Image: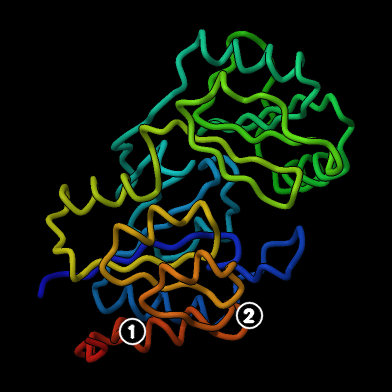
């Protein structure tokens, strides 16, 4: 067996999903990551957030790299390895469609985020206030806006409009009013496959940790798929191991189980 590599979702996996707008990283999670790092395990964040909205608390963790925006941007040891920008004409079409359909949208990019809020949507205000409080850069919405992915919001009691203009994008529907949208050429799983090849990691030495439906491709591609107890049942069905919530030391317990903390032999097979 060679060097081990771990990929971690952020919200609800590295962080306490019950912390609300505030990012709360359990002490046990910080301990587990530091011990694994000291044991020589490669550690990567693998999040739907663009790098610009990854909280500093997460960036300060002992990570070897970041997969952001559901695989639309990849960094290893401070060096950008991959970036997939949505083409300009498609970006303009998306922005016009948001207005035409009366949706609200968060456009997400490495450099920052931008908002079109045609609904005056309460969750959008929470997002904007939280992001600005965290110091994340707010970009201007115009035809020169560059973004890698985006999120639509609708009224909770209304149906989703026709989204066929983005058929070549993966859509993750959540909460009855929210849809995260990613170019189909990218995913958390595709990013892992690329890094495994680049870093010459064997399949049996790869671990993923997640809790949400945008983690599905990540969980499918790794030999060891660890799912948090707060995940929905369809995500849990993909797990090779289910652990407790982050707030209940779930990440520490899972990494301990797989012998990732002090270089112990993995006896879980």
Residue at 60% in and 40% down: 180
* The one of 146 and 61 positioned closer to us in this rendering: 146
Residue at the spot of label 2: 247
Is 160 positioned to the left or the right of 143 in the image? right
Numbered marks: total = 2
Residue at the spot of label 1: 261
Residue at 50% in and 35% down: 182
Image coordinates of residue 12 in percent, x first then y, are 60, 66
The local secondary structure at tag 2 comes to: helix
Is 234 positioned to the left or the right of 262 in the image? right
Specify the quadrant that holds the N terminus: bottom left
Residue 204 position by quadrant: bottom left
Residue at 46% in and 83% down: 252
Mark 2 to mark 1 CA distance (whole Å): 18 Å
Residue at 22% in and 86% down: 269
Image coordinates of residue 256 in percent, x first then y, are 37, 88
* Image: 124 above or below 203: above
Mark 1 surroundings: few (<14), some (14-19) or many (≥20) residues within 10 A:
many
Image coordinates of residue 241 in percent, x first then y, are 40, 80
Is 14 positioned to the left or the right of 151 in the image? left
* Image: 16 above or below 109: below
Depth check, mark 2 against mark 1: the one in front is: 2
Mark 2 or mark 1: which comes first in sequence?
A: 2
């Amino acid at each position: 067996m060679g060097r081990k590599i771990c990929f971690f979702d952020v919200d609800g996996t590295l962080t306490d999903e019950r912390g609300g707008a505030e990012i709360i990283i359990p002490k046990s999670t910080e301990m587990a990551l530091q011990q694994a790092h000291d044991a020589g395990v490669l550690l990567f964040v693998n999040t739907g957030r663009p790098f610009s909205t990854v909280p500093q608390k997460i960036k300060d963790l002992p990570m070897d790299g970041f997969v952001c925006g559901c695989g639309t941007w990849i960094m290893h040891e401070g060096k950008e390895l991959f970036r997939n920008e949505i083409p300009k004409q498609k970006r303009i079409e998306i922005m016009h469609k948001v207005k035409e359909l009366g949706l609200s949208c968060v456009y997400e990019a490495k450099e920052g985020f931008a908002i079109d809020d045609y609904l005056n949507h309460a969750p959008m205000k929470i997002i904007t206030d939280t992001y600005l409080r965290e110091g994340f850069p707010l970009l201007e919405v115009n035809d020169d806006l560059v973004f890698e992915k985006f999120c639509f919001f609708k009224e909770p009691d209304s149906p989703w409009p026709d989204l066929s203009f983005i058929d070549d994008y993966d859509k993750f529907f959540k909460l009855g009013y929210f849809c995260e949208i990613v170019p189909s050429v990218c995913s958390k799983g595709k990013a892992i496959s690329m890094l495994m090849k680049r870093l010459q990691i064997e399949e049996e030495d790869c671990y993923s940790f997640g809790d949400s439906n945008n983690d599905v491709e990540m969980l499918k591609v790794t030999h060891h798929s660890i799912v948090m107890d707060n995940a929905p049942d369809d995500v849990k069905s993909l797990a090779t191991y289910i652990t407790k919530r982050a707030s209940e030391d779930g990440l520490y317990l899972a990494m301990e189980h797989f012998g990732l903390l002090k270089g112990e032999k993995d006896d879980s097979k």
